[in-house]
Structures are given as structure tokens and as C-alpha cells.
Image (cartoon, helix red, strand yellow):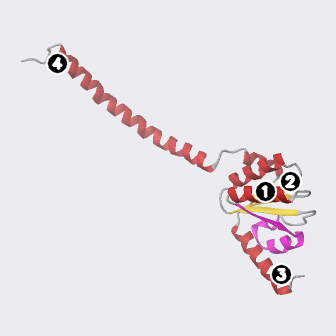
Amino acid sequence: MKKKSDKQKDLDALKKDFEKARNIFVTGFEKLTVQQDFELRKTIRGAGGNYKVIKNNLAEKAAEGTPAEEILRDLAGMTSLAYTVKDPVALAKALTGYAKANPTFTFKAGMVEGRVIDVKSIQQLAALPAREAILAKVLFLIQAPAQRLVTALSGVGRNLAVVVDQGVKEGKFSQ
């Protein structure tokens, strides 16, 4: 059994994590095997997240005064948390993909950018394109007008060169 000072350290560390993490997914993991748990942790790390199996009352105490307080209140059953300070879409995609392969892994609630979301919203979030794909599309849209302008301007010069070349070939510029 842990000493009270060790429990307090765990509580303080968890509270710091909750204060930093803007994206938290509360999940249930009943009947997962050790191998399945290992794969889940590997998947979450690959998406840039952290994963903890946690006692419900510890989670509730650690969340007091943080944005996560609302989703970690009155938890029941076996609970685990996946959280990140990075891209919530990547973590949601990883968790949703894992949940499809392992039906015993379930979602209870979530928080994205400090806002509480329900299970349906987690699945909608996972359906979004990755952050990099969205940034690539925005960059393309920003560059497209400049690219069109350069093409139009180079077209004028090219057309002028063609006209001059035709005139030379036909002898219209001779003295």
C-alpha cells in the first residue's frame, strides 16, 4: 500500500497533466488482455498522446479546478484516460480505430480544446482529415492566386514572343 505522501505526489502530477492537457478522452477498457493493452498504449504513443489507467476518485480529485473537472465527475466502472496537448484529431483517429478492432474498449466522454464533447462527437472528430492535410489544403489555397497571376503574366510574354517569332519568319521585320 502506498504512503500518503506518495499518493499526494501522484495526485499533484495528475493535476499538472490535467492543467496542461487540452484534449482528454475518457475510456473504458474492461476485458482487455495484456497484449491488447500493450497495443493500445503503443497506438496512443504513436498519435502523440499519453495513456493512464486511473482510479475514479483520484481522477475526480485531481481534476478539481481544471477544465477536465466536468468530464471526470461521477465516473463509474474501470476508467482510463488518453490525453494530449498536441493534435486531438490524430489521437481520436487512433482511439477510434483501436475501438473498432477491440469492441470491449469504449468511450465515456471527451474534452477537446477545453470543451466537453460526447461520444458521437469523438467519432465525428476522428472522421476529420489530419492536421497536416488541412494545413496543406490551406497552403494550396493561399498559393493558388499567386500561381495563377504568374501563369497569366508569363503567358503575355510567351504570346509576344510567338508573335515576334512569326513576324521574323514571315519577313515582316526586314529593312
At label 4, the amino acid type is Val
Q: Secondary structure at mark 2?
A: loop
Mark earlier in primary sequence (1, 2): 1
**Is residue 57 in the magenta section?**
yes
Amino acid type at circle 2 is Phe
Q: Please provide percent x and percent y for residue 78.
A: 90, 63
Residue in the picture at 51% in, 45% down: 139
Indicate whether 96 appears above or below 59: above
Quadrant assignment for the C terminus = top left
Location of mark 1 (residue):
40
Residue carrying label 2: 105
| Disc 3 residue type (three-letter) | Lys
Circle on res. 168: 4
Q: Residue at x 77, y 47 (%)?
A: 97
What separation in Å lies between label 2 and label 3 (alpha carbons)? Answer: 27 Å
The reply to whether the C-beta atoms of the residues labelled 1 and 3 are less than 8 Å apart is: no
**Which residue in the structure is indicated by mark 3?**
7
The residue closer to the viewer here, 131 or 36, is 36
Horizontal relation, residue 77 to residue 158: left or right? right
Residues at marks 1 and 3, CA–CA distance in whole angstroms:
26 Å
| Residue sitting farthest toward the left | 175
- The residues bearing labels 1 and 2 have C-alpha atoms spaced at a distance of 10 Å
Inspect this view and state whether residue 116 appears: no
Query: Mark 2 touching mark 4, by CB under 8 A?
Result: no
Occupied quadrant, residue 47? bottom right
- Residue 115 in percent (x, y) is at 75, 59
Secondary structure type for disc 4: helix
Name the N-terminal-most of marks 2 and 4: 2
Q: Quadrant of residue 68?
A: bottom right
Compared with 125, 50 (above or below) is: below
Residue 102 lies in the magenta-colored region: no
Does label 2 or label 3 sit earlier along the sequence? 3
